[in-house]
Image: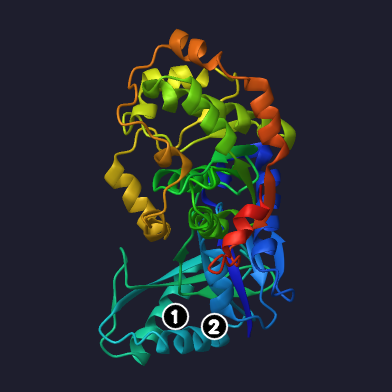
Amino acid sequence: MKVRLLVRYGELSTKGRNKKAFTQQLAKNIKKAIRQYPEVKVHPEYDFMYLDLNGAPEEEIMKLLKPIFGIQSFSPVYIVEKDMEQVKAVVLDLLKDLNPTEKNFKITTKRSDHSFEYDTTDINLFLGDAVLDAFPGITVKLKQPDINVRVDVRREHIMVSLQTIQGAGGLPVGTSGRVNMMLSGGIDSPVATYLALKRGMEVQLVHFASPPYTSPDALTKTKRLAAKLAVYGGSMQFFTVPFTEIQEQIKKSVPENYLMTVMRRMMMRLTDELRKQQGGLAIATGESVGQVASQTLESMIAINDVTNTPVIRPVATMDKLDIIAVAKEIDTFDISIEPFEDCCTVFAPPSPKTRPKLEKAREYEARLDVEGLIEHCLAGITVEEITASSNFDQVKDDDMEDLF
């Protein structure tokens, strides 16, 4: 008996004439996720996609499918010849593994081959009676049953499935263009990255490091967060930006209460330069309105002033507890709360300006050699590819020095 995994699209079903591009990208993402199983063949169709396992471990493949955005749900399906006695034998055999006693069930039949000798009602009654005879104590329930036996009569064969596994939803990564995400080691920006990936964006990660003020452990922590996020986005480029010189110059030249505003303006400039180099369409951040001084609307106006590039803020309107809930769900929370300070917290003034004036921010920033600092910083940026299997547990102290 041949086993397939049937993948349902969900939101992709609404894409009309663009649907083919979305399904092809999803197929590409699935092939990338299961590349260690080359025997699995992916077949994208208009209304669904199926994977022929060809002996690959079913449970392992399903585990790899769960975090792939663009999949609404998927089911293991069993391919049976168009013989109802064989279909009955398969259904009873599969039910036996689910210990169906004292559970309820229904049979749901679809018949695209209308020339088949049994119609949907005949099939439902035939299989329903067989299940009731085979398993004393099981009952029929047509709405929200414990077990839904799906039977799909097609021209070439019949497919049987008993499980529907919820997928990650959203849009396939890579269908909404590339963005450059400013990733810190905190709670919010990894959640923002996850939400951007879910809307189909290809995310490149930009992290600002300020050695020796920030430790190698702080950089490692952020890379570990990136590896967690790579489960959803595949491999991602991670840009480490050496920010020490810029922060020192800002601290020397700018009044204390405007340090954070000017610092964020410089971060925005650098991220925008990387975006241009990498062909990105937007900048993304983990800012949540009103959460800290640099995230008030007045601060955002002063910071956005340095670019005309769209800035996407996926968690802008979320409460902190809601952000934490998502962080726990995607398994980034425990890493995010590890006590390694990033460059924002190390240089944070005691009383930052919560409602900075744009004119003042420009005035204080004019004291800096902005172009020279940006050019020197860009020359020192390093980039690496991070995947879900990347291991950053062992990092030597001199690794950080080698980056700058």
Q: Which residue is mark 2?
A: 87
Q: Nearer the viewer, residue 209 or 153?
A: 209
Question: Could you say where residue 209 lies in the image, as x and y percent from the top left?
Answer: 55, 44
* Image point (42%, 41%), residue name: 346
* Image point (55%, 53%), residue name: 69
Q: Is residue 158 visible?
A: yes
From the viewer's perspective, is residue 231 above or below residue 35?
above
- The outermost residue toward the front is 252
Q: How is the image coloured?
A: rainbow
From the viewer's perspective, is residue 395 above or below residue 248?
below
Earlier residue among tags 2 and 1: 2
The quadrant where residue 277 appears: top right
* Image point (61%, 65%), residue name: 390
Question: Could you say where residue 126 lies in the image, as x and y percent from the top left?
Answer: 44, 80
* Image point (33%, 90%), residue name: 135
The quadrant where residue 85 appears: bottom right
Q: Mark 2 and 1 residues: CB-CB less than 8 Å, in contact?
A: yes
Q: Is residue 258 left or right of residue 380?
A: left
Q: Secondary structure at mark 1?
A: helix
Question: Could you say where residue 66 lies in the image, as x and y percent from the top left?
Answer: 51, 64
The amino acid sitting under disc 1 is Leu
From the viewer's perspective, is residue 312 above or below residue 85?
above
Q: Nearer the viewer, residue 358 or 131?
A: 358
- Give the number of the disc on residue 127: 1
Quadrant placement of the N terminus = bottom right
Question: Could you say where residue 93 lies in the image, as x and y percent from the top left?
Answer: 47, 89
The amino acid sitting under disc 2 is Val
User: Within 10 angstroms of label 2, few (less than 14), some, or many (20 or more) residues?
Assistant: many
Q: Is residue 117 visible?
A: no
The quadrant where residue 273 appears: top right
Q: Nearer the viewer, residue 282 or 102?
A: 282
